[in-house]
């Protein structure tokens, strides 16, 4: 596998595919963030819509070696971005109701059992990748902009968004970290005025999706690999960084940083956070937040990612 020069040597507990997925996500994120800096956010944060962070002493203003990493689903946004993206593709007849039911079954199993069944995951991944195979990256990007307006814009948690804004106001970079396609994640980051996004990277050649992933879904250990790789590339000190998530699956990512937060946490993460005295934030009102992500979080999520930077990394890995 190719080795990127800016990565620091370490013992790796993740699989080779997790490492490849993380490194591909970091490379794509850095490329996309450069493009985002030239654009104005389409949806600036309105003061009256934001809640003030509960700990004004953090983050530290002017600490350029610190950054913040935010999980997306049920942390920044109610429900799963991949599900909303899947709804948009279904509406545009990218796949049929039989495909949708298959995605739903795979994700429902994951949600209810609390474990990833390899057979279900593989079936959903393969079906989802076949949907976008042959489509142009630019086409899915354009559709993603429309889908954000249709299904996502009104589902952003004001409290979490305010936390992200506090890091931006302190002069720090803020990154989304999600299993959603990197293009979809980058659209959301741009709309919220964030630095960029780490997401699942799918291979493309000459701007057309091949139907293959670079590595695997950016999920669990792969998220931690992506954060580690990006921190090395950006010259960040992870001990100074913050990370936010709702899911116990993100414990590897949260454990990397010096300031982990459990936001709208599931039961396992809440218990883990309390045991380790991590900060807790819950912006849900009255009842447990709905897990809207059933039909597509492992399905359509593997779809749309990475474009040129990722494809180049994949080819380099094969050569080496």
Image (spheres, helix red, strand yellow):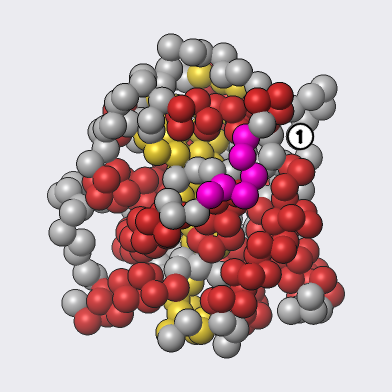
Query: Which residue is pictured at 82% across the width and 22% down the height?
Result: 286
Name the foreground residue: 26 vs 33: 33
| Image coords of residue 169 (percent x, y) | 46, 27
Question: Camera-side residue: 231 or 266?
Answer: 231
Q: What is the magenta range?
A: 40-45
Q: What residue is shown at x 38% (from left), y 70% (from top)?
A: 310
Residue 140 or residue 211, whichever sits in front: 140
The quadrant of the picture occupied by the C terminus is bottom left
| Residue 127 sits in quarter | bottom right
Indicate the position of residue 107 as horizontal and vertical percent values.
69, 58
Residue 124 found in image quarter: bottom right
Q: Is residue 172 left or right of residue 150?
A: left
Could you tell me if residue 272 is visible in this image? no
Q: Which residue is mark 1?
A: 289
Looking at the rendered structure, the number of numbered marks drawn on it comes to 1
Residue at the image position 72 percent from the left and 50 percent from the top:
152
Residue 21 part of the magenta segment:
no
The quarter of the image holding the N terminus is bottom left
What residue do we see at 54% from left, 63% from top?
A: 183
Residue 31 visible, this angle:
yes
State whether the magenta stretch is mostly helix, strand or loop. Answer: loop
Q: Residues within 10 Å of mark 1 (few under 14, many from 20)?
A: some
44 in magenta = yes
In the structure shown, which secondary structural element does the residue marked by tag 1 occupy?
A: loop
Residue 155 picture location, percent across and down? 74, 42
The image position of residue 234, as x and y in percent, is 27, 45
> Picture quarter containing residue 123?
bottom right
Q: Is residue 34 left or right of residue 319?
A: right
Q: Against 180, is 278 above or below?
A: above
Tell me if residue 168 comes above or below residue 4 in the rendering. Answer: above
């Amino acid at each position: 596998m190719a080795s990127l020069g800016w990565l620091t040597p370490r013992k790796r507990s993740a699989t080779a595919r997790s490492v490849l997925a993380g490194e591909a996500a970091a490379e794509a994120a850095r490329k996309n963030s450069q493009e985002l800096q030239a654009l104005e956010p389409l949806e600036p944060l309105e003061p009256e819509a934001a809640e003030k962070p509960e700990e004004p002493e953090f983050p530290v203003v002017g600490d350029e070696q610190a950054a913040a990493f935010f999980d997306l689903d049920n942390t920044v946004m109610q429900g799963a971005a991949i599900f909303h993206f899947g709804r948009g593709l279904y509406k545009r007849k990218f796949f049929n109701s039989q495909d949708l039911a298959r995605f739903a079954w795979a994700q429902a199993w994951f949600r209810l059992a609390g474990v990833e069944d390899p057979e279900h995951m593989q079936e959903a991944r393969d079906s989802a990748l076949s949907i976008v195979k042959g489509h142009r990256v630019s086409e899915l990007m354009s559709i993603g902009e429309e889908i954000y307006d249709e299904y996502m814009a009104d589902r952003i948690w004001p409290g979490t968004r305010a936390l992200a804004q506090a890091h931006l106001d302190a002069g720090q970079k803020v990154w989304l970290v999600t299993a959603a396609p990197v293009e979809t994640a980058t659209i959301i980051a741009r709309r919220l005025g964030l630095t960029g996004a780490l997401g699942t990277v799918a291979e493309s050649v000459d701007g057309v999706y091949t139907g293959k992933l670079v590595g695997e879904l950016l999920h669990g250990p792969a998220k931690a690999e992506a954060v580690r790789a990006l921190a090395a590339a950006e010259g960040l000190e992870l001990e100074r960084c913050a990370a936010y998530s709702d899911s116990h699956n993100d414990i590897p990512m949260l454990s990397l940083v010096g300031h982990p937060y459990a936001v709208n946490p599931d039961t396992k993460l809440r218990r883990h956070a309390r045991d380790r005295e991590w900060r807790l934030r819950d912006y849900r009102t009255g009842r447990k937040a709905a897990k809207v992500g059933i039909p597509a979080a492992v399905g359509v999520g593997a779809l749309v990612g990475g474009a040129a930077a990722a494809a180049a990394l994949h080819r380099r890995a094969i050569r080496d």
